[in-house]
Image (cartoon, rainbow, N blue to C red):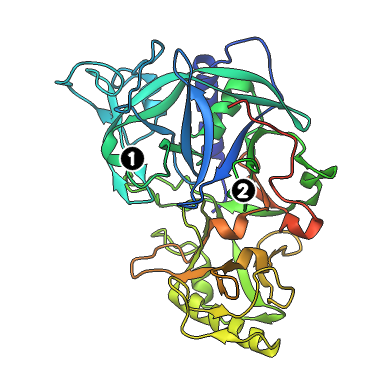
Amino acid sequence: MEFSNTIVFFIILVSLLLLGSAAAQSSFRPSALALSVSKDASTNQYLTHLRQRTPFVPITLAVDLGSRHMWVNCESNYISSSYRAPYCNSARCRIAGPNTACGGTCNAPQGPGCNNNTCSAFPSNPFIQVTTSGEVGEDVISLASIEGSHAGPPVSVQNFLFICGSSPVQPGLAAGATGIIGLGRSPIGLPLQLAAAFSFPRTFAVCLPSSTSQQQPGLIVFGNTPFNVIPGLTVSNLLTYTPLFINPVSTAPVSSVGEQSVEYFIGVRSISVGAHPIPINNTLLTIDRSGNGGTKISTVDRFTVLHPSIYRALTSAFISEAQSRNISRVVPGISPFDVCFHTARGSRLIPNINLELNGANRPIWTITGTNSMVQVNENVSCLGFVEAGEYGVTSIIIGGLQIEDTLLEFDIARSRLGFSNSLIGHGTTCSNHNFTSPY
């Protein structure tokens, strides 16, 4: 189902509450805000940086497109004179969502993450599948504004709601990261809190880098502003749109009965390799009443994860198409990949994978070799798709590799996704911009 009027009303109501309490620190009203995002060479996690606390401390967070909130390890030297923990059953606590509870009494010295009669929530680390209990907290954050193609003055948001987590949930994050920033369409996800604080449209754009160089980051932009890259290309003009859908069943590790997912789902109608459609059980492409099936986009999964039957159909078609183009296969594959070839990932001989999506004129998301293949050594590249495990719920999870150097615009207000296809085909990348983060 698409966004309902009830959900839109609820988002507007929560936005009004957040607008009053998470206000900008100064009278300066930016048109958009931005975070730089880098790719960690060791883990391939996407990382971003902002400032938090009083006095400000720079923090590094892993990016989770589908998480409902931001969490930080408060046991890692969290000191701030502006930290507050909303009281249990308060309006601020209720904004944090249905999965909160009264925290009771803390027997350790009181401080961030340990206060009496506050509300607790459940920070999760999807990289190691660990969920713990944490305290709902408020503190100031600061990030850069964006003016045209350049960084503008930094701005602050007071009373930003997040989850004060603990050390057991941090392992598995990239070196230097002390938490996760959630971009899900939750009232306390970063996009909706910023939209409420600055009266932005409920829209944000993600452009992930393919390079692991710290000097070549991508961008996450909040608000409605043209996305420009060198050489003077307004990538926003390249966007094609497809509807966003709501999964009626939460996909979070901890959820309440009747809670909907905050992740971003789209509708795939068919998949083809080259010009040849692959056979798919169409019931797998829609979300059923139990929340199974459908297609979502993830920054946590490194590669696209497919239901076993879709995976077998795709790999079989890809092998046949590659052989027809005289691309020799490497057998066996190289873990974790089953399908590998003697070719470079950027070769024009590599077949395109086309996703036919829902929407006007049935838009096509084309995945070229630079987004479908992984260069595992000098002479061999492998198809960067993996088979879902036994307990997979979502039929297609479009992973990080497949969305690198592609502009994705998540228009929450209008329930649609804009996508550009690979910018490499336009002679540029997500890293080719003039924005320099002050952090």
Tell whether label 2 touches label 1 (CB within 8 Å): no
- Which one is nearer the viewer's eye here, 201 or 349? 349
Residue 319: % across, % down: 59, 84
- 225 above or below 2? above
Q: How many angstroms separate mark 1 from mark 2 (CA)?
A: 23 Å
Q: Is residue 370 left or right of residue 95?
A: right
Give the residue displayed 71% in from the left and 86% down from the top: 325
- Which amino acid, by three-letter code, is at mark 2? Leu
Q: Is residue 269 left or right of residue 22?
A: right
**Which of the labelled discs sits on residue 423, or is there none?**
none
- Which amino acid, by three-letter code, is at mark 1? Gln
**Which of the labelled discs sits on residue 170, or is there none?**
1
Residue 176: % across, % down: 43, 37
Residue 143: % across, % down: 58, 25
Residue 276: % across, % down: 68, 82
Task: Report which residue position mark 2 lands on.
Answer: 208
- 49 above or below 25? below
Q: Between disc 1 and disc 2, whose residue precedes? A: 1
Q: How many marks on residues?
A: 2
